[in-house]
Image (tube, rainbow, N blue to C red):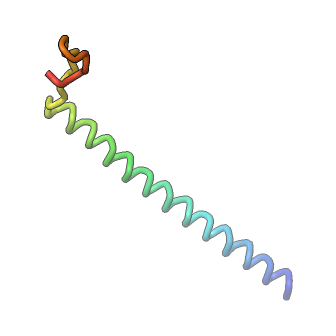
C-alpha cells in the first residue's frame, strides 16, 4: 500500500504543478496583452510630445 500512496502523491503533485504553470502562463499572457494595448493606445493618440530645450533656462520642456 505505501508505494501506491507515494505514487498517488507524485501524481497529485504533478497535477498541482501543471495547474500552477498554466495559471502563470495565462496571467502573463493577459498582462502582456494589456501592456501592448497601452503602448498601441499611446502611439495612436499622438499625444506624445517631444522635449525641446528652453534656451533661457536650459531645461527641457514639452513643445
Query: Can you tell which quarter of the image residue 52 is in?
Result: top left
- The image shows residue 28 at horizontal and vertical percentages of 44, 52
Total numbered labels: 0
Figure check: 59 above or below 11: above
Q: Is residue 39 left or right of residue 46?
A: right
Residue occupying the point 20% across, 39% down: 41
The front one of 44 and 57 is: 57
The furthest residue to the right = 2
Q: Nearer the viewer, residue 54 or 7?
A: 54
Task: Point out the image quarter for the N terminus.
Answer: bottom right
Residue 18: x and y in percent read 59, 63
Q: Quadrant of residue 4?
A: bottom right
As drawn, which residue projects farthest toward the bottom? 1
Q: Position of residue 40 (x, y in %)?
A: 24, 36
Q: Nearer the viewer, residue 39 or 17?
A: 39
Residue at point 78%, 76% (across, down): 7
Residue at coordinates 22% horizontally, 17% vertically from top-left? 57
Q: Quadrant of the C terminus?
A: top left
Residue under the image location 24 percent in, 21 percent down? 60
Which residue is farthest top?
A: 55
Q: Is residue 5 above or below residue 31?
A: below
Q: Which corner quadrant of the image does residue 17 belong to?
A: bottom right
Place of residue 15 in the rendered image (x, y in percent of width and height, measured from the top left): 62, 70
Left or right: 62, with 38 as reference point:
left
Task: Classify 8 as above or below 46.
Answer: below
Amino acid at each position: 500500500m505505501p508505494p501506491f500512496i507515494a505514487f498517488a502523491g507524485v501524481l497529485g503533485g504533478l497535477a498541482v504543478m501543471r495547474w500552477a504553470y498554466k495559471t502563470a502562463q495565462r496571467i502573463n499572457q493577459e498582462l502582456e496583452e494589456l501592456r501592448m494595448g497601452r503602448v498601441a493606445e499611446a502611439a495612436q493618440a499622438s499625444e506624445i510630445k517631444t522635449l525641446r530645450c528652453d534656451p533661457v533656462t536650459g531645461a527641457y520642456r514639452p513643445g
